[in-house]
Image: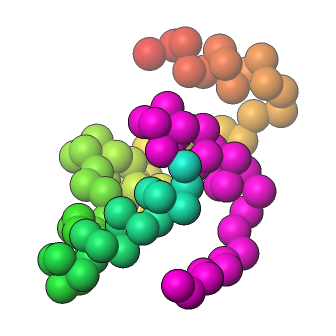
């Protein structure tokens, strides 16, 4: 039997351990399940793609890139909050 060692962020390890424990698994078992499924699917067992964004988010990104519909800068946080509450 082989051993697999990987380095991951401490928070990712903790959060993954917590998630899998809630499912009745430990992390090594979850990794074995993933690897087995990858072999079964002959690739990733789930689609790899960008998250879809809402039209509102896409429009906001375009506005920011084209310097449209921007407000500020504000001198204080109070000014920024007041401007947000105006609408």
Query: As drawn, which residue projects farthest toward the left?
Result: 41
Q: Is residue 31 left or right of residue 71?
A: left
Q: Is residue 18 left or right of residue 58?
A: right
Q: Is residue 71 left or right of residue 75?
A: left
Observer-nearest of 28 and 17: 28
Residue lying farthest front? 1
Horizontal and vertical percent position of residue 85: 55, 12
**Residue that appears at 66% across and 78% down:** 6
Residue in view at x 44 percent, y 57 percent: 30
Q: In the image, is residue 33 above or below residue 13? A: below
Which residue is at a point 69% across and 25% down the rendered structure image? 80
**Colour mapping used in the image:** rainbow
Q: Is residue 63 above or below residue 42?
A: above
Q: Does 86 appear in magenta?
A: no
Check the picture and name the quadrant holding the C terminus. Answer: top left
Q: Residue at x 47, y 58 (%)?
A: 29
Residue 6, above or below 23: below
Side of 18 relative to 33 (left or right): right
Residue 5 image offset from top left, x and y in percent:
67, 80
Residue 22, visible in the rendered structure: yes
Q: Is residue 67 visible?
A: no
Where in the figure is residue 26, as x and y percent of width and height? 55, 49
Give the percent coordinates (x, y) of residue 4: 60, 81
Q: In which quarter of the view is residue 54 placed?
A: top left
- Residue 10 on the magenta segment: yes
Residue 63 in the image: above or below residue 20: below
Residue extent of the magenta highlight: 1-25
């Amino acid at each position: 039997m082989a051993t697999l060692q990987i380095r991951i962020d401490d928070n990712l390890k903790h959060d993954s351990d917590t998630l899998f424990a809630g499912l009745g698994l430990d992390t090594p078992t979850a990794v074995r399940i993933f690897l087995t499924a990858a072999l079964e699917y002959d690739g990733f067992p789930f689609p790899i793609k960008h998250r879809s964004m809402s039209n509102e988010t896409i429009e906001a990104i375009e506005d920011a890139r084209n310097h449209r519909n921007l407000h500020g800068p504000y001198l204080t946080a109070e000014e920024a909050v007041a401007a947000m509450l105006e609408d």
